[in-house]
Amino acid sequence: MSVIAYPLYPEIAREHLMLYSPFEGETKKINDDFFLKSTRVRKAIKQAKNSGKEVRLWWPASDYELKLDMDQYWESRVALAFNGGWLRIEGDQAIARIPIRYPKRAFAPLFTVPGIGTFGVQEGLFWVLQQEGWYHTGEVEWVAAINGSM
């Protein structure tokens, strides 16, 4: 799955590859600002700054679909990688804490072909691999510097 996803969703591929080795109780850190392009993340940054608290990140499944519009593409890319995570602000950094695991029942729609239907990933299939010990769950923190205008 990681090889297939990488060209369009490199962050998802990276997170998926993390499942192959144990986290050993540690949170892995990745310095990358790709998620700052998301409208929902920018709103969460403002909310976290104003409240001084960690903010839940969520997207509807419809945001997962691959679209030809670049803004929508970035939103789907961040949604797939960060949905269900949390965002906090520490100094001049936005830190997104993301659980790396698959839910028991979830369908991630990726694209729709008119007249045929929606193609996507049934994440519950990967959940079974977690239960069997083939995948190792944990957390990753994506860290990005933010400027004062956010």
Image: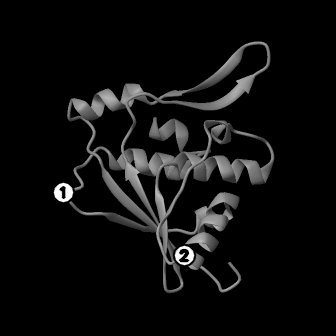
Residue plotted at (71% across, 83% down): 149
Q: Nearer the viewer, residue 60 or 1?
A: 60
State the separation of the CA atoms marked 2 and 1.
32 Å
- Residue placed furthest toward the top: 115
Q: What residue type is labelled 1?
A: Glu
Residue 145 seen by the camera: no
Task: Determine crowd level at label 2: few under 14, some 14-19, many 20+ residues with C-alpha closer than 10 A.
Answer: few
Q: Quadrant of residue 113?
A: top right
**Dot 1: what SS?**
loop
- Residue placed under numbered mark 2 in the picture: 51
The C terminus sits in image quarter: bottom right
Residue plotted at (43% across, 27% down): 105
**Place of residue 2 in the rendered image (x, y in percent of width and height, measured from the top left):** 46, 40
Task: Determine crowd level at label 1: few under 14, some 14-19, many 20+ residues with C-alpha closer than 10 A.
Answer: few
**Place of residue 104 in the rendered image (x, y in percent of width and height, measured from the top left):** 37, 30
Q: Quadrant of residue 148?
A: bottom right
**Place of residue 69 in the rendered image (x, y in percent of width and height, measured from the top left):** 81, 47
Residue 114 seen by the camera: yes
Q: Which of marks 2 and 1 is in front?
A: 2
**Dot 2: what SS?**
helix
**Left or right: 78, with 27 as reference point:** right
**Place of residue 98 in the rendered image (x, y in percent of width and height, measured from the top left):** 42, 56
- Residue placed under numbered mark 1 in the picture: 24
Vertical order, 64 against 54 (above or below):
above
